[in-house]
Image (tube, grey):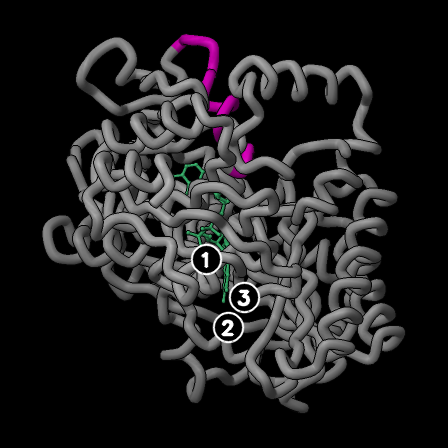
Amino acid sequence: MSDVLKSLIEIVGKNGVSTNAEELWYYSRDPGVLEPHRPDFVVAPKTTQQVQKIVLLANSEKIPVVPMGAAMALTGLVIPLKGGIVVDMKRMNRILEVNPLARYAVVEGGTSQGMLKAYLQKHHPELRHSLPDAPAATTIAANVSLHGQGRLSQQYGFNSDMVTGLEVVLPTGEICSIGSPSLGPYWFSKSPSLPDLSGLFLGWLGTTGIITRLGLMLYPNKKIRDVEIFVTDRPELVPEMLYRLTHLELLEDINAWFQPKPLVFKDNYQITIYFTGDDDDEVEFKRKMVWRALQPYMDSKDGGFMSIQYMKQMLLEMPQRTIADFADVAKGGGFEYSGPIIPIEHFPRYAAKLIELAEKYNLLYAGAARLISGGHAMMFAVSFAFNREDADMMLRVKQALDEATEFALQQGGIPWKPNFHEQRMILQRMDPNTRRILEMIKRNLDPRGIMNPGNWEAN
Ligand SMILES: Cc1cc2nc3c(=O)[nH]c(=O)nc-3n(C[C@H](O)[C@H](O)[C@H](O)COP(=O)(O)OP(=O)(O)OC[C@H]3O[C@@H](n4cnc5c(N)ncnc54)[C@H](O)[C@@H]3O)c2cc1C
């Protein structure tokens, strides 16, 4: 048994470490199209102190460390590109505090979206958090590490904007608090009139430290949720429609999407509009305002509301599980999406590009955009389904996604949850002075280069 394995067992106990071939196989991949790469060890800590000891060990031995949530980012962000230790955070899953009046929760770094949702439903049904449509097992810390977005992002911004404090184990082993918890026991703000150091960890894809605790804003959970779908066959009108909807300042979530299958959706562009209320009057008022905002397009016969009774329940599900059904459209259960963050007026050109790429590479596609912060931006998901048995199809998906990223960069978009190759494309195009700041931060926080290496590296 190697010394490293012995030390890891001393830190977390023998049930918390594995070098079994079957488990290493599992931890060497994610569900997307990137090549797998084997880790040397998998370890599942239960406390911040254990995470600290693992990182100190990795630091002294110069072994890569890859923090992992549920490995569902789809862009291979937890594939251990240079081997080393995968730190599976799922056993750190406690909900430590809910402050119902200040509306925030404090959770451990492996807590899943589903666990927080279930906990709030049981103990604080008047509160909710911004749940992404990712599977319920995905973790909150991972989601903010990649600037995820969820059901409340239309109103309140990226899920990472909703962080109220962090506890992080730095790559050099120090345990560090960020925001109000650095000054006292309260987790109400990540930057209460201080320089906002959370930016050193949010969006860094686990390359600057391991988040072991985080505070998260909670929001009112209204008693009723409802949904409408507006359809148009004129993509060029979608940005204007979205603008009119966000002008209302009333809506929960707004998604614009299009896909060629099933045929009922072919050649159309759907806008799904979610709204909430504490009673029927509030909901009906909002529905009336939505109809009023889109009335001009009904008058000009450019669009109309769809009858959605048969799919309403599915649409109101959180997370919306049927999104993953797309993986089976090509048979063989795979799909991958990357999604640039773009200004909303660019929706039509990205929609045209996605259809062009699907034709060029002979792939099945779906396009979906979620509005962020009242329409200041949107995440435009470029999704392709693939059959895992078909290596050629997987290669074509990879090529199409690379081309989509190149297109996004040309258009001034920002690739979201980029894989390591796309990260390089971003760094190469970035203002050199900005890139130097990023490199300086990374070098200073992680002088031995052990944290999720291969990510946010220019070469
Ligand atoms: C069907 C489907 C729907 C989806 N819908 C959405 C959506 O609506 N919104 C959305 O945002 N995403 C969505 N996603 C993408 C993705 O699943 C989510 O972003 C999810 O939050 C990723 O969480 P994870 O635990 O699987 O992350 P992982 O893949 O495990 O990790 C992602 C990144 O975070 C880092 N990381 C993990 N834990 C830590 C930690 N404790 N400290 C520091 N770094 C860490 C990892 O190193 C990696 O770089 C969807 C995915 C699928 C399959």
Is 357 above or below relative to 165? below
Q: Is residue 271 visible?
A: yes
Closer to us: mark 1 or mark 3? Answer: 1
Q: Is mark 2 within 8 Å of ligand 1?
A: yes
For the residues labelled 1 and 3, the Cα–Cα distance comes to 11 Å
Is 456 above or below relative to 125? above
Of 223 and 173, nearer the camera is 173
Which residue is denoted by mark 3 in the rendering? 31
What residue type is disc 2 on? Answer: Ile
Q: Is mark 3 within 8 Å of ligand 1?
A: yes
Residues at circles 1 and 3 in contact by the CB criterion of under 8 Å? no
- Give the quarter of the figure containing the C terminus: top right
Q: Is mark 1 within 8 Å of ligand 1?
A: no
Residue at 47% across / 16% down in the picture?
196
Closer to us: mark 3 or mark 2? Answer: 3
- Give the quarter of the figure containing the N terminus: top left
Q: Is residue 201 magenta?
A: yes
What residue type is disc 1 on? Answer: Tyr
Judged from the image, the secondary structure of the residue bearing numbered disc 1 is: loop
- Image position of 312 (left or right of 109): right
Judged from the image, the secondary structure of the residue bearing numbered disc 2 is: helix
- Tell me the tag on residue 323: 2
Residue at 69% across / 62% down in the picture?
382
Residue at 63% across / 51% down in the picture?
379
Is 166 above or below relative to 191? below
Residue 252 drawn at (x, y percent): 43, 54
Closer to us: mark 2 or mark 1? Answer: 1
**Which residues make up the magenta segment?**
193-205
